[in-house]
Image (cartoon, helix red, strand yellow):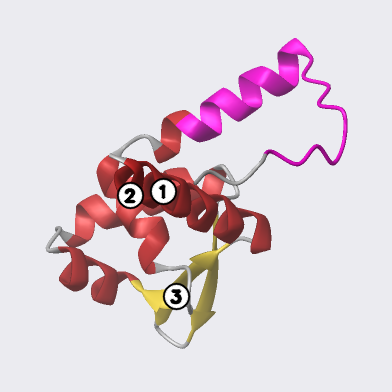
Amino acid sequence: MRKPVVKTQRLDLPEDRATQLADLFRLLGDTSRLRIVAACLEQPTAVSAIAEKLDLSLSLVSHHLRLLKAARIVRAERQGKNVFYAADDEHIRRVIVDMLEHVAEQRDED
């Protein structure tokens, strides 16, 4: 059974904000980038650990992280020689978790 949609505020979406939001969704629409963000949700994670976990090259992960960082989806924290990446804020985490729940609900209903 689906949860009812709860209206919390009126959604005003002017053209410039719609463009910004569409750009964010476009970035997250790439499977590799989405998996990279998911790998950074729980704790800051080193580039090498992300690459190993997802079986991707270091250069590809670094490239995607540059794009995600520029869009403020992830943030970088330098610790010595290593750079660790984490979701930029709780909003990013909630969007990913909420959409995963949404996908799971769709499968449960089929």
N-term mark: 3 or 1: 3
Extreme residue in the front direction = 1
* In front of the other: 72 or 54: 54
Q: Residue furthest right?
A: 9
How many other residues sit within 10 Å of disc 3, few (<14), some (14-19) or many (≥20)? many
Amino acid carrying label 3: it is Phe
Q: Is residue 78 left or right of residue 51?
A: right
Residue with the mark numbered 3: 84
Quadrant including the C terminus: top left
Q: Which residue is mark 2?
A: 108
* 22 magenta-colored: yes
**Residue 105 badge:** 1
Name the front one of labels 3 and 1.
1
x, y percentage for residue 4? 66, 41
Q: Quadrant of residue 47?
A: bottom left
Q: Which residues are magenta?
A: 5-25
Proximity of marks 1 and 2: CB atoms separated by less than 8 Å: yes
Q: Work out whether residue 100 or residue 57 is closer to the camera in this orientation and state it.
A: 100
